[in-house]
Amino acid sequence: MAEADTKAPDTREHVRKIIFEADTPAGKAFDVALIIAIIVSVLAVILDTIPSISAEQQAFLQTAEWVFTILFTIEYFTRLWCVESPSLYARSFFGVIDLIAILPTYVSLLVPGAEYLLVLRFLRALRIFRILKLANHVQGARTILQAMRNSQAKIMVFLFTILILVTIIGSVMYLVEGRPIKVTNLERIKVKQRVWVGNIAESDMAIVVAVSPGPHNEDARTGSLKVRFTNRKEHEVKPDEAVWQPYNEKFESIPKSVYWAIVTLTTVGYGDISPITPLGQFLAAIVMIMGYSIIAVPTGIVSAEMARVDGPFSPNTRSCANCSAEGHRLDAQHCYVCGAELGEPDEEALEQWFKEDKEE
């Protein structure tokens, strides 16, 4: 009886090291097989969205989906079984992703009309990040993550500065492109467009609710126009009342102008909003040039931190038996997440890690 009790923990520990660590041949083989299964399952989801393929291979794709779902379900519960604290693993990043990878298929089966949840299967691709556990990649992955953590304060200051900059740029472009001009032809007016009625210096902003252009007349505005002021009061615009609209209706508000500044500064350039005045186009050219130099700033910050992080005690794939956290240093004695004792690393894992570290 005592022999059976000691054998069960040994089996759980052996399975845990295979599933959660990649320093041993068995662990590497498991991770490679898992990555192949993830890639094939994601490809099956992609093919299922192509109408021509889905119509001809519907039965095959559904069968493949259930096969992968059952395999990932067995893997998920095996992970919960072999760790000392299943609740900690279930709440971890990879624990949540593992659950999302299998949940949509079961929900679509049990809940009528929930087939649209199957799109969440694409989140299964996030599990591919497990490839970072492989010994050849864990060093670089941990270096990047630690460098990004160390750079948080500097990057936040940089982003705050950019936020102020795009707000100023957007406000300037609003003044340049969105300045009011007098409307002489109602054909340029659209429903829900912002306009001013009467004396521009005293008029409140109004929204067009109905417009009916009349015959073209160069001397006077023809047609009818109804607007709604900010106080919800509707007004029928008289023929002798002046109507004003933004020179460039795309820049009708500061938020839209700030949106344009962000798109332009990041060199994305959707083209849905663009300046039409010479001054606006000149300012846009300056913002574009600024964008190329600004993009390099966060890259330099993270690169500098990466040079500092890399050291002699680099993280490896040792995992905590209690919470399954990975990436502990070789000299670590306690888990950096839950504080549980790690114990001594396996000699086989140490030998393999030092061999690969020496080759690098």
Image: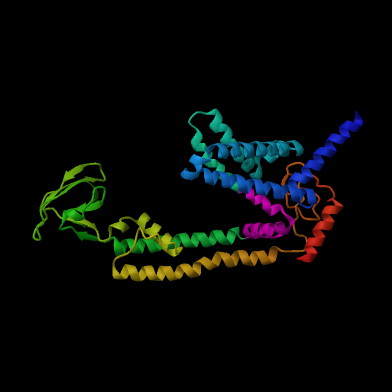
Q: For this rendering, which residue is in front, 99 or 69?
A: 69
Q: For this rendering, which residue is in front, 30 or 342?
A: 30
> Is 184 a magenta residue?
no
Pinpoint residue 8: horizontal percent, then vertical percent.
84, 34
- Mark yes or no: residue 339 visible: no
Q: Residue at x 68, y 52 (%)?
A: 131
**Secondary structure of the magenta portion, mostly?**
helix
Pinpoint residue 267: horizontal percent, then vertical percent.
45, 64
Name above or below for residue 209 compared with residue 137.
above
Pinpoint residue 147: horizontal percent, then vertical percent.
65, 60
Q: Residue at x 73, y 44 (%)?
A: 324
Q: Which residue is drawn at 70% across and 47% down?
A: 33
* Total marks in image: 0
Residue 241 left/right relative to 312: left
Residue 211 left/right relative to 340: left
Name above or below for residue 358 compared with residue 121.
below
- Mark yes or no: residue 34 visible: yes
Residue 347 left/right relative to 49: right
Magenta region: 126-150
Name above or below for residue 9 compared with residue 138.
above
Q: Residue at x 53, y 46 (%)?
A: 46
Q: For this rendering, which residue is in front, 94 or 251?
A: 94
